[in-house]
Amino acid sequence: MANQEIKSEVTGTVWKIECKAGDRVAEGDVLMILESMKMEIPVEATLAGEIVEITVQVDQPVAEGDVVCVVRP
Amino acid sequence: MSAPRPEAGQPEAATLDPLDELAFRRDEAQRQGGETAIARQHAAGRLTVRERIARLIDPDSFREVGSLAGTGRYDQQNRLLSVTPAPYVAGLARIDGRPVALGGEDFTVRGGTTFGSSRRKGGQGGFVEDLAFHYRIPLVNLIDGAGGSVTSIQKRGHSVFPGVHGFERSVSLLGTVPVASAVLGTAAGGPAGRAILSHFSVMVRGSSQIFAAGPPVVKRSLGMTIDKESLGGARVAVDEAGTIHNAVDTEDEALQQIRRFLSYLPSNCWEAPPVLPADDPVDRCEERLAQIVPQKRTQAYSMHRLLQMVIDRDSGFEIQPSHGKALITMLARLGGRSVGIIANNPMVYGGAMDAAAARKQIHFMEMCDTFHIPLVFFVDVPGFMVGEKAEKAGTLREGMRAVFAAGRLTVPTLTLVIRKCYGMAGMATCNKNDIDLKLAWPSGEWGSLPIQGGVAAAFARELRAAPDPAAREKEIEAELAAYASPFRSAEAFAVEEVIDPRETRPVLCEFIALADKRQQSSLGPRLRSGVSP
């Protein structure tokens, strides 16, 4: 299966990144936390695999639908 | 158009035995638009209308109506050569043992447009709608057509005034029987309109498109070149616009979703929804619910996961999962009984209600109200969405329409506050003038606005006068926070019960079952009056 992009569901700011390239993750693992509407919004892995790339940095604004990282199944 | 086959033009055709003629005409109907047209339909990754019907319904339950309608070709002696079937296949059938009316355009015949007769099988004002209306059974539209063709004006010799074949029947169906539509091709014009006049609609990603008008019209009207997928594919029509409710990857899944949707609904508004034997214990208490809401009030959690722990196992069917995602609308079962679940989703903008979420909630509430499906609200809403984008989208008006629609509900509702219930968006989650119950978890908090942030505005003068305004603000916040406890509201009987999160399922199952007599005694069409804001 091809690499899967993990996208942000919301517009907000990257608050904390809780994984790095090369990490193995399970479906439902929290990959990073965004701040939006004064709430901490976890971005969860939608599938199990290996983090290939994190495409955002802490404090970076993201829009709804932006790719925040890439997972190889 | 099928070519006349050599064996069709038998010289003695005019004097055929009537039973042989019937068999011949039936056979012609089964040939649809001919082998080439069927192959073209398959090559586009689409099923024919007859294949769709067979896959949708209970085996061998199709009772076709109007199978002989079409356009006959005769020789000079008036002997029958061939029949091109009407481009619409319709009839009655069973889904899960219950009768339905169904029909769909046959795209292999003239692209699913009209045929010679002045009486319509399908389309607006078509006979299939009469079947659903008079038999008081659900209607399933299998839509694969682009509406009127200008060739019919030539045949008729005049143009048809809009509304002569009107939507009156489609409109009255919406208040009486369930209507489900699958968009299985490119839909524009009338067929597109009928897809919207449905309680539930679904389309196929990649192979279906829907729009008011397709690329050629857009090109002519606006000079804009755009392909049909960008104009009306699922990403636009489902995810962004909410024109169609659900998107799936295959036609089979679309048909499956229609069966699933109908399984929660009664056959008409004079009946209560079907009750299935519950295969999940109603007294199941889920230990994990005690911990699911984080202590820190700014931390989001998964409302989807929460709902799955409460409803009957695997009974959830989400409507519009990819649109207006700050809100979850889901048909489900509690103790085998159909319920409509409306839950705020803290993972998307903290669950704040935007215009899309409001519209989604309104449609879902009205549908459940019409078919007597009790509503259960899982509330965690900080208020209406704020900001310039939200104001431009008309959030305040759409949000107040949700409040208006909630105020007109007569179906039993249960409101369970999980965390936040603030402001006017909070008012859209209950029908507080009725006896409908307001329950809360101990994590519940509510008010016209949160204390945090509200103090600065409400106590401005006192804060300015204080030697250390920031410290005084904290003090007042702490003082007010004690009153904000849900137990204080329960003391005042402002909420009926505060429940242990682990007992959510048993409590909800019991209240839903207890509402049965109320539900049974208010069957029939809903009368809605007044002007929606």
Image (cartoon, rainbow, N blue to C red):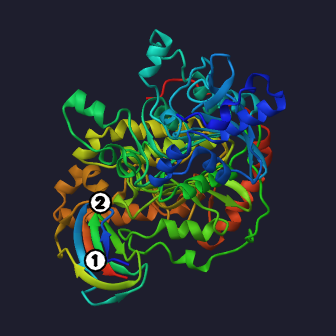
B278 on left or right of B449: right
Q: Residue at x 29, y 30 (%)?
A: B217
B414 on left or right of B306: right
Kindly state the secondary structure of the residue where label 2 is placed.
loop
Pinpoint residue B321: horizontal percent, then vertical percent: 47, 56
* Amino acid type shown at disc 2: Met
User: Can residue B500 be seen?
Assistant: no
Mark nearer the N terminus (2 vs 1): 2
Q: Residue at x 77, y 54 (%)?
A: B275
Name the residue nearer the viewer: B409 or B18: B18
Q: Residue at x 50, y 50 (%)?
A: B39
Q: Local crowd at mark 2 within 10 Å, few (<14), some, or many (≥20)?
A: many
Q: Which residue is mark 1?
A: A70
Q: Farthest front residue?
A: B11
Q: Which residue is mark 2?
A: A37
Tally of marks: 2
Kindly state the secondary structure of the residue where label 1 is placed.
strand
Pinpoint residue B385: horizontal percent, then vertical percent: 33, 49
Up/down of B198 relative to A66, above or below: above
> Which quadrant of the structure image shows residue B495?
bottom right
User: Can residue B250 be seen?
Assistant: yes
